[in-house]
Image (spheres, helix red, strand yellow):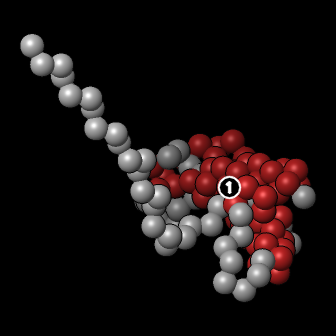
């Protein structure tokens, strides 16, 4: 599942970049705005008079793909987290321990913070007195 999430995330980044590019080259309504600032006048010459409607259609489809990928990735991430090893390990550690006992972090694979006081430092032995002269 991790490979699928990574692959879909890569595709999502590519679609996001394409969508940003498509929005920037859109023909503005009143010959002003961000589209004109980034050279959308050249799109009319390159792609012809019907480029506006074609670009609008492509932008709508790209936006739909972007939205669908976001929803799919959110669902897969939620599915992975709900059935992931961390959630299972917590449930198993809680079910294995006795009431009131703190599970051992080394054996259960979990790091559990406790409010237990830190162990007292080892008692230091006083240094031997210096010999008298």
- Residue at the far top in the pictured view: 133
Count of marks, rendered view = 1
- State the image coordinates of residue 52 (x, y, percent, origin top left): 68, 60
Question: Image height check: is 94 above or below 59?
Answer: below
- State the image coordinates of residue 61 (x, y, percent, origin top left): 79, 66
Question: Image height check: is 122 above or below 64?
Answer: above
Residue at x 52% of width, y 55% of height: 35
- Residue at the far bottom in the pictured view: 99
Horizontally, residue 73 falls left or right of residue 27, namely: right
Residue at x 52% of width, y 45% of height: 39
Quarter that holds the N terminus: bottom right
- Residue at the far front in the pictured view: 133
Rendering quarter of residue 83: bottom right
Taking the image as drawn, is residue 22 in sight? no
Taking the image as drawn, is residue 120 in sight? yes
Residue at x 69% of width, y 42% of height: 46
SS at mark 1?
helix
* Label 1: how many Cα within 10 Å (few below 14, some 14–19, many 20+): some
Q: Nearer the viewer, residue 2 or 51?
A: 2
Quarter that holds the C terminus: top left
Q: Nearer the viewer, residue 89 or 43?
A: 89
Q: Nearer the viewer, residue 79 or 34?
A: 79
- State the image coordinates of residue 72 (x, y, percent, origin top left): 82, 70
Question: Image height check: is 19 above or below 57?
Answer: above
- State the image coordinates of residue 105 (x, y, percent, origin top left): 70, 60
Rendering quarter of residue 75: bottom right
Residue marked by disc 1: 16
Residue at x 88% of width, y 50% of height: 3
């Amino acid at each position: 599942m991790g490979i699928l999430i990574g692959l879909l995330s890569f595709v999502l980044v590519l679609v996001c970049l394409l969508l940003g590019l498509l929005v920037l080259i859109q023909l503005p309504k009143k010959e002003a705005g961000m589209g004109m600032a980034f050279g959308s006048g050249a799109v009319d010459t390159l792609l012809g008079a019907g480029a506006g409607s074609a670009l609008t259609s492509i932008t709508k489809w790209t936006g739909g793909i972007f939205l669908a990928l976001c929803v799919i990735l959110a669902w897969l991430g939620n599915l992975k987290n709900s059935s992931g090893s961390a959630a299972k390990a917590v449930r198993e550690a809680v079910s294995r321990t006795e009431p009131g006992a703190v599970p051992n972090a080394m054996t259960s694979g979990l790091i559990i913070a406790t409010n237990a006081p830190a162990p007292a430092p080892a008692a230091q032995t006083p240094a031997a007195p210096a010999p008298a002269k």
